[in-house]
Amino acid sequence: MATFYVTTPIYYVNAAPHLGHAYTTIAADVMARHHRQRGDRVFFLTGTDEHGEPVADAAHAQGVEPQELADRNAGRFKALAPQIEATNDFFIRTTDPQHEARVQEVLTRVRENGHVYEGIYEGWYCPRCADFKADNEIEEGNRCPIHHIELTREQEENYFFRLSSFQEPLERLYAEQEDFVAPRTRFNEALSFIRSGLRDVPLTRHKLTWGVPVPWDPEHVFYVWFDALLNYYTALSYAGEEDLTAIFWPPDYHIIGKDILRFHAVYWPALLMAAGLELPRHVFVHGYLLMDGEKMSKSLGNVLDPFAVIERFGADALRFYVLREVPFGQDGSVSTASFELRYETELANELGNLASRTIGMVQRYRAGKVASVAPDAQLAADFDGLPERVAAHVDAAELTLALEEIWQRVRRLNRYVEEQAPWKLAKESGREDDLDRVLATLVEGLRAVTVLLWPYLPASAERLLAALGSSDVSFAVAALGSASIEHVSPLPSLFPKEPAAGSA
Ligand code: MSP
């Protein structure tokens, strides 16, 4: 059996979740669901990053201990997953004792392998990023390019990770594995960072106490990024009843935002090499969801509240919107206005109407019974190879392109209704067979697109398939003509135009 292992970044618990976090989790969930449809054994991991300076600072500012803040916000992230219909197999918290023990074990091995030494670090540091900034990254006024806050000059006695010695192995990795990082612009960005010369990086922090203690020098804790990156590896060892590492390692996809490219595309593979572990197959880097032209983030205060959207329109609509509106892999703007427009024109008018018209006509003209006839050859031709094309896009994490392939068929079916005008056929004598064929084609086309839409719109797809009496969502029945519906049942509106709170 094929396996598929997909991860999201683990989210900082210094603030509550917002749409930016939901976005990555939704995307990873679409991939996980798609692979489950294909019969793969899937492991989908998400969780929270709880150590380090940003969390410690946020806790102290609120007058609580870091663990208390971590518990509170980890709970919110954990609750977000089912609300956006994410089917993660595990939720890791970096304060899990099993994670901490495994981090100590792996990083001790990295040291034993000769990649760690003691030294002094001095540089410009952003406490929000928990990261030192290179001179060419610093914004005017000595500010962080992401958070626009003033950087602090830090000097610290640290243990260092010998990143510089991985320059050549990393260049080789990028030469041999052209799809290690995608999209291409991100691949090029990471590669040019590598080529510009890698400096060793601090592996531990001396001044901090909120972190995983360094076993060989308990006055230090591990630098939060190394602790965090290792979550992808440690989780497998304790997420299940048995150790899943041998089954799922290495990951097929790390899905990340572009803000954390360097950590995943440079530090992470180097660290894995240093530990003697296999590298992930792909890192896919999506862009920012922007509001008013700025990255949406809690600290900037420009946040579209995913919970409010879900309450009013349902999680499906949110999942659909973020993957449809913003080409996955690029930056794009989101707004309440464009959300409502897509909801109305695409979900309600195109898919919702197609479903209600199709089911309505079968009920009206055939008392709910669907004739057992082959779908119209002309329409079937427009569905040829569709599941394969969708799968190829999802394999490349091209989630917006995959959705567009499917949506073109939703539109094709709507055109088919107009072309064939079943309401006219119903009035003409001698056209009974034609009407049977048109209705059977519509029902089967609707069923096939719905199976393909399931990873994006799981709840609506399940309701729709239930009304078609065919609950199978496996990829084996994703092609037009691969199943046959006998009977349809009434379906309340899938995407009501004016959804009442909580009803969508
Ligand atoms: N804790 C680190 C990641 C460690 S992974 C080993 C971190 N956490 S975070 O809470 O800041 O989350 C960052 C991730 O959230 C981004 O990489 C991205 O996946 C998602 N996003 C947060 N804001 C976003 C937008 N405005 N737009 C798109 N994605 C965003 O960094």
Image (tube, helix red, strand yellow):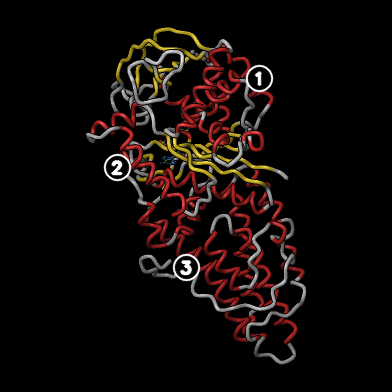
Residue closer to the observer: 388 or 136: 388
> In the image, is residue 360 above or below residue 471?
below
| Three-letter code, disc 1 | Arg
In the displayed structure, does residue 56 sit left or right of residue 455? left
Q: Residue at x 63, y 17 (%)?
A: 169
Upstream in sequence: badge 2 or badge 1: 1
Ligand number 1: quarter of image: top left
Disc 2, ligand 1: is the CB inside 8 Å?
no
Q: Residue at x 40, y 58 (%)?
A: 310
Residue named by callout 2: 301
| Three-letter code, disc 2 | Gly
* Figure quadrant of residue 52: top left
Upstream in sequence: badge 1 or badge 3: 1
Q: Position of residue 491 (x, y in %)?
A: 53, 75
Disc 1, ligand 1: is the CB inside 8 Å?
no
Residue 495 bears which disc, if any?
3
Residue 172 bears which disc, if any?
1
Distance Cα–Cα, label 2 vs label 3: 30 Å
